[in-house]
Amino acid sequence: MKITDTGDLWWKNAVVYCLDAETFMDWNDDGVGDFPGLAQRLDHLAELGVTCLWLMPFYTSAERDDGYDIIDFYGVDSRLGTHGDLVELIRTARDRGIRVIADLVVNHTSDQHPWFVQSRSSKDNPFRDFYVWRADEPPDTSDQVVFPDQEDSIWELDETTGEYYLHRFYKHQPDLNVANPHVRDEIAKVMGFWLELGLSGFRVDAVPYLLEGAGGRDGNPDGDPHDYLRSLRSFLGRRSGDAILLGEVNLPYPEQIRFFGDGAGDELSMMFDFVGMQQFYLALARQDARPAAQALRDRPEIPVDAQWATFVRNHDELTLDKLTDDERQEVFDAFGPEESMQLFGRGLRRRLPPMLDGDPRRIRMVYSLLFSVPGTPVLFYGEEIGMGENLDVPGRLAVRTPMQWTAQRNGGFSHAEPDDLVAPVVTGGFGPEHINVAAQRNDPDSLLNFIGHLARRYRECPELGWARGEVLDQPHHAVLAHRCTWDDSSLVAVHNLSAEPCVVPLVLDDVGPDTELVDLLQEGRVTCSEDGTVQVPIGGYGYRWLRVVQPGSRRLV
Ligand code: NOJ
């Protein structure tokens, strides 16, 4: 591998961490997290091994969808700080070797955005075509809504003009008309603005919906909507050569792959692996690794510059929408049997550790797998200490509670009165008295130190970011064994999803005599026999990362 590859394509081997400044650290004690508080905690992220910070929306918003309902694309939510505070944050992060990306939410705006206020005011307003309007009565679209608890149509009648506007999400989030060249210009300007302030790219919200109405070049309705994504990527590249677009595209693999740009890799730089994540939960529920193994096999080949973003939790409901009804029910039965734990009939509003009853072996095995499957791992804040959810908080907000720093009041997040906090802290066994950063920093056996260890080892293993990966055949259904090889590095990872220990026979056909598999996460090694077979013992819920060390190798193990 050329040195320029590893350095330039930084996202291929990054550790991404997602947070909302609002719930991370409150520095002025008004009950709302802020940029100065987050800046104070960047060393925590640096020590953890984070190399890319993804900021959830921090823009001026109507706060009816936690910031995803933007009123001013150039504004900063004044509760979080100022533009100056944000720039300080980005600069300090860079000093710690951490790039910052942010949500780009341009499928829609808030209905309070000045464009929409103008657009709805009359049919001949110059901003009318910034949004998508129809005069005729829409058909039943109740099966297309994203939030079925609140909406029953994707069209809303607007009294002033008697026409309907499109809203894929809540009715207070009208969809922008990206076929309109003026809207495209505005979106480019917004991207350019934040890039100038130091962002290294964007997490692009709701990409398939964004493209839905895009039409082709310059909005030509008969053209290819992907032209628009290509043009966004090329604009990004012109403005900032190493910036990325990390897209939210929850589609089956054959449809999803198009968003990398057919072969050319000229659309999204990264996409979340929603399908792999869902199959992984099915595997976890069944204690049978085969669904996860199959998903890895099914992953399409991607362009060399592109990358999968792997995750086990994000800020939304843990969606299981790509499973069959029976499969989803299996996961519900295992991890969220009560209705209050489920959401939208398709997902769970819990975090991983409570779903696994806090079993430290299983939790560690899951994160070991997350960091070892080919791709770039994305952590949601609090995962590094094993935070739980607060089911008393409505909907998706159950997993967006304040970060737990200490065992003190409000988990050390803020000195404000508990009733004044932006969100209530977790209570019970996963509350701050039991789960917090301060205690885990001082405990060498803590989850925090374990995840830091995984992050460091991951960063040392370019093959985990760069290889396509290969599932290895072996007879134990509960075990996932896979191998990543890139250039002169090769790693075999073995994970046991069940409580039963076993010995996993593997055949590595390209290794010679005296090749050793050396453990990277703990002390240990196994030697291959002359024909390349090797027996790997693994404990219940065990995990092993084994570096393939050929005689004479100079790889550090
Ligand atoms: C996807 C985001 O992840 C979600 O949180 C948000 O509500 C919708 N897009 C609408 O922006």
Image (spheres, helix red, strand yellow):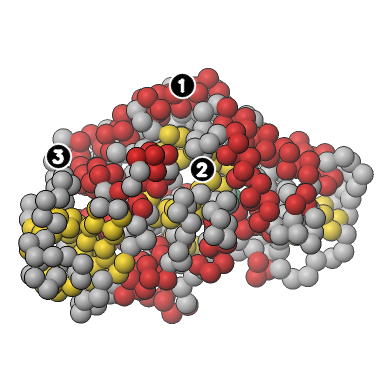
Residue placed furthest toward the right = 124
Give how far apart the Cα atoms at labels 3 and 1 are.
32 Å
Q: Amino acid at mark 3?
A: Asp
Give how far apart the Cα atoms at labels 2 and 1 are.
21 Å
- Residue 443's label in the rendered image is 3
Disc 2 element? strand
Q: Is residue 159 left or right of residue 28?
A: right
Residue at horizontal 45 percent and vertical 64 percent from the top? 301
Q: Is residue 41 left or right of residue 140?
A: left
Tell me residue 342's x, y (percent). Answer: 45, 64
Disc 3 element? loop
Q: Is mark 3 within 8 Å of ligand 1?
A: no
Q: Is residue 47 visible?
A: yes
Front-lying residue, 261 or 88: 261
Query: Mark 2 highlights which residue?
Result: 244
Question: Mark 3 packing: few (<14 Cα in 10 Å), some, or many (20+)?
Answer: few
Q: Is mark 1 within 8 Å of ligand 1?
A: no
Disc 1 element? helix
Q: Is mark 2 within 8 Å of ligand 1?
A: no
Q: Is residue 287 left or right of residue 393?
A: left
Residue at horizontal 47 percent and vertical 77 percent from the top? 324
Give how far apart the Cα atoms at labels 3 and 2 are.
36 Å
Q: Amino acid at mark 2?
A: Ile
The mark nearer the N terminus, 3 or 1, is: 1
Query: Mark 1 highlights which residue?
Result: 88
Say if 220 sits above or below 70 in the image: below
Front-lying residue, 307 or 7: 7
Q: Are marks 3 and 1 in contact (CB under 8 Å)?
A: no
